[in-house]
Amino acid sequence: MYKIDFSHPCHVYFVGIGGISMSGLAEILADAGFKVSGSDRQKSPLTEGLEHKGIKVFYGQRATNITPDIDCVVFTSAIREDNPEYIATMEQGLPHLTRAELLGQLMKNYGTSIAISGTHGKTTTTSMISEILLQAGTDPTISVGGIYKPIGGNIRVGGSKYFVTEACEYTNSFLSFFPTVGIILNIEEDHLDFFKDLADIRHSFRKFAELLPADGCLIINADIPDYKEIADGLPCKVIAYSMSDTGTDYYPSGISHDAFGHPQFTAHTDITATGDNDIAARQISLSVSGDHNIGNALAALALGDFLHMDSEISVKALKSFTGTDRRFEYKGTIGGVNIIDDYAHHPTEITATLKAAQNYPHKTLWCVFQPHTYTRTKAFMDDFAKALCLADKVVLADIYAARETDNLGISSRTLQEKIRAAGGTCYYYPTFDEIENFLLENCTKDDLLITMGAGDVHKIGENLLGI
């Protein structure tokens, strides 16, 4: 594998530079004095931001973009071998890295590298941890998979030993990392276009945990079935948290909700894990909706304690955290209808979001859902139907294919039939214009409308609001 010498900046080219993670890495290297350029299919706020920083961005991926003065080419997992820039890189024999390999090499430059993994909740938990580190004045470097308003984007270049990043399991990307602290939020079936089954996924998370050094720490959700299979026998410290097991190091009690569904609870800590009696029981109030965020907050709290952050600062930071873009994000109100946008694209995430919405003031709960990839939709068809029935009324958009070309013989109509068979009220329209017109005619004052999915479904709510 090619090794970047960070003491001698060179020219690095990013294929797919407009991605949420790739753009962040490009910015970190540019800030470190590297010459950075790259390509993407189309202009976006992220590519425009890079251009404002003096980074050259090519729109359209062409072989001619790959020039001999490039010292290293970085690819995302979405880039295929028939990509013209991939082919040109190989033909010219240029050094190259995957996004994950570059991120792993970058992590080695920091004394404390924190990697947050899990099937769900990575962006929110990474942002909660970032809030704690920022309020503690630690000057961290942050790479988050969403737009986190306190840093004005998805990246913050700091000047301390702390580095915080998400760690995605897809294509085993996180196995290229070098964390000193790892967090595993949950492990469920997903990305079945790469993994064989749940056992295969669990094996990868175990390998991720084994990356941690003896003086490091694994923070893991004890509600993961047989979690000790992942955590036992590691040389590092292991801290377990749970929503239900009072025998773990961290757990909640006395859960209640304010008028907007924001959880309040007592966070209990086993002081034998920390030696600090002052943190045995802390009152936590969150400013984000959903009980799933209690678990995310416990993981962030445990991380803060392990790093010896001031407990009062951690509690205050969790209270002040108001979420990231596309995570139960309030977009606006039109005609008395509140519009929320959420990134949920897995049945577990949909269930968590819709249960959170049930605690939010509303008359009728509408969910406009855009399924993400044919593989995921087919694998979890029945689970999607069951989860979406938590909404009063569901409107389906066409499946967002992303990297896929084979429709596997399914469509959103297939999912519509499943939802109706399960007793749900479900509509399907193939275009956003039709969906928007339907909503304008049928949503009424005090309804709650959630646009949901990992594609571009957020545009529906934004178009209704005129933003």
Image: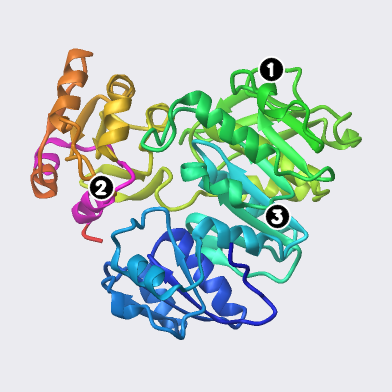
Look at the numbered disc 1 and give the secondary structure of its residue: loop
Question: Who's the residue at 75% across and 46% down the image?
Answer: 304
Mark number, residue 279: none
Q: Are marks 3 and 1 in contact (CB under 8 Å)?
A: no
**Residue 462 is a magenta residue:** yes
Amino acid at the residue labelled 2: Val
Question: Who's the residue at 68% across and 63% down the image?
Answer: 140
Amino acid at the residue labelled 1: Asp
Question: Who's the residue at 62% across and 36% down the image?
Answer: 184
The spot of residue 49 in percent (x, y) is 41, 75
Is 260 on the left or on the right of 8, as rendered? left
Is 317 on the left or on the right of 466, as rendered? right
State the residue position of label 1: 245
Look at the numbered disc 2 and give the secondary structure of its residue: loop
Q: Choose the circle earlier in sequence order: 1 or 2.
A: 1
The Cα atoms of the two marked residues, 1 and 2, are separated by 37 Å
Instruction: Say which quadrant the C terminus sits in.
Output: bottom left
Q: What is the total number of numbered labels drawn onto the structure image?
A: 3
Amino acid at the residue labelled 3: Ser
For residue 431, say whether it is visible: yes
Within 10 Å of disc 2 (Cα), the crowding (few <14, some 14-19, many 20+) is: many
The spot of residue 246 in percent (x, y) is 73, 18
For residue 185, say whether it is visible: no
Q: Which residues are magenta?
A: 438-465
Mark number, residue 113: 3
State the residue position of label 2: 457
The spot of residue 462 in percent (x, y) is 25, 55
